[in-house]
Amino acid sequence: MPVIKPVIVAVSSAPVSTGGVIATTVSPTVARFYAAITAAMIAGGVTTIPAASFLDDADAPVAALPVPAANGYYNVYINGILQQGGLSTLTAVSLALASGDFVEGTPVLLEVGTFGGDSTLTTQPTISAPTITIIS
């Protein structure tokens, strides 16, 4: 007895997504701090500037330095020149520079930037179901 295979012809449509509104807010925060290098900061080939030596944009002394999270950055400018990232280490208590070759009074500018963000789905999308139509 021969095997009979049914032949079915069908047409289908993919699901369609419409609508959906997402509100996204990005909140950058940038802070700048200034210090002048003193002889006491230079020791053993490393220059360590304590947080208390920095002034903020309002010329107010700083108790602690902000340490950027994974979504942030910091830049160090010495004598107005941007330094390479691997030449400094920032903690809440100090900025360490990988060199002791500075003259007293050398200006150091620290710029710390962080980015906060939030996304909210304000309108749910509408997704249609796929359709399959059997023709024969």
Image (tube, rainbow, N blue to C red):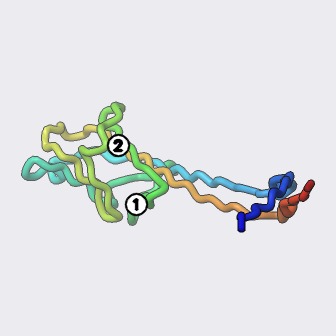
Q: Distance between the residues labelled 2 and 1?
A: 13 Å
Q: Which quarter shows the N terminus?
A: bottom right
Nearest the viewer among 93 and 89 is: 89
Tell me if residue 129 can be seen: yes
Q: What's the residue at 43%, 46% (across, down)?
A: 111
22 to the left or right of 36:
right
Tell me if mark 1 has few (under 14), some (14-19) or many (20+) residues whose alpha carbon lies within 10 angstroms of its own: some
Amino acid bearing label 1: Val
Question: Any mark on residue 50, and which?
Answer: none
Q: Which quarter shows the C terminus?
A: bottom right
Nearest the viewer among 59 and 5 is: 5
Q: What's the residue at 10%, 47% (across, down)?
A: 45
Name of the residue lying farthest toward the bottom? 1
Q: Quadrant of residue 85?
A: top left
Q: In this view, does 74 lie above or below 79?
A: below
Q: What's the residue at 87%, 61% (across, down)?
A: 128
29 to the left or right of 93:
right
Going from N to C along the chain, the mark reached first, 2 or 1, is 1
Tell me if mark 2 has few (under 14), some (14-19) or many (20+) residues whose alpha carbon lies within 10 angstroms of its own: many
Badge 1 marks a residue whose secondary structure is: loop
Q: In which quarter of the image is residue 24?
A: bottom right
Badge 2 marks a residue whose secondary structure is: strand
Nearest the viewer among 2 and 49 is: 2
Q: Where is residue 105 in the image (x, y as percent from the top left)?
A: 25, 39
Amino acid bearing label 2: Val
Q: Quadrant of residue 127?
A: bottom right
Q: In this view, does 64 lie above or below 53?
A: below
Q: Mark 1 points at which residue?
A: 67
Q: Position of residue 106 (x, y in %)?
A: 26, 38
15 to the left or right of 39:
right
Q: Mark 2 points at which residue?
A: 76
Tell me if residue 126 can be seen: no
